[in-house]
Amino acid sequence: MSVKFSFTINGKSIKGDVEDRTLLVQYIREHLGLTGTHVGCDTSQCGCCTVHIDGIPAKSCTMLAVQADGCDVTTIEGLEAEDGTLHPMQQAVLEEQGFQCAFCMSGFIMNTVALLNENQNPTRKDAAEWLSGNLCRCADYDKILTSVMRAAEITRGA
Ligand code: FES
């Protein structure tokens, strides 16, 4: 069954019809062409599909597109400032080479952005706990956490 819905994504208003069974991640990738949000497991385990819904990180493979009706959604494509300035976590990942294959990286970045919105001075343990719902198949966690620490420094202007 097709359902009418509307939401905002990365500052752009979207109005339309969607099959009620369409997952949010499917809609984002296949209908909107925003392929920075990845699907790793499709079973709510890996966190690759993390986006923000009204500022809260959410696994977009575990919700229907219609559940985002009226919400403000942000994907990795919406993090960069209008002048092209990267978000501190994007910058930190580049500086620290905080990835290997990078398939999981957009999910880690989106979840870290939410962490830094709550706590600009996290410990490494805080960050590890916050990011425990994100998996890296290359097991590059040490460099990812180093990137989070660097992103916190950039955010604080240190
Ligand atoms: Fe959504 Fe893995 S693809 S949690």
Image (cartoon, grey):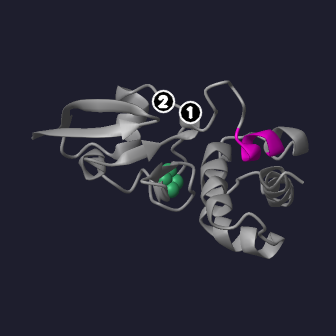
Circles 2 and 1: CB distance less than 8 Å?
Answer: yes
- The dot on residue 77 is 1
Q: Residue at x 56, y 56 (%)?
A: 47
Tell me the element at label 2.
loop
- The dot on residue 101 is none
Tell me the element at label 1.
helix
* Of the pair 58 and 15, the residue shown nearer to us: 15
- The dot on residue 34 is 2
Q: Residue furthest left?
A: 1
Which residues make up the magenta segment? 87-92
Q: In the image, residue 12 lies at what x, y percent?
A: 39, 30
Kindly report the distance in space between the C-alpha atoms of the residues bearing marks 2 and 1. Answer: 7 Å
Q: Residue at x 42, y 54 (%)?
A: 54
Quarter of the figure that contains the C terminus: bottom right
The answer to whether 6 appears left or right of 95 in the picture is: left
* Of the pair 123 and 2, the residue shown nearer to us: 123
The answer to whether 11 appears left or right of 95 in the picture is: left
Measured along the vertical axis of the image, is residue 9 above or below residue 146?
above
Measured along the vertical axis of the image, is residue 31 above or below residue 19?
above
Q: In the image, residue 4 lies at what x, y percent?
A: 14, 38
Q: Residues within 10 Å of mark 2 (few under 14, many from 20)?
A: some
The answer to whether 111 appears left or right of 90 in the picture is: left
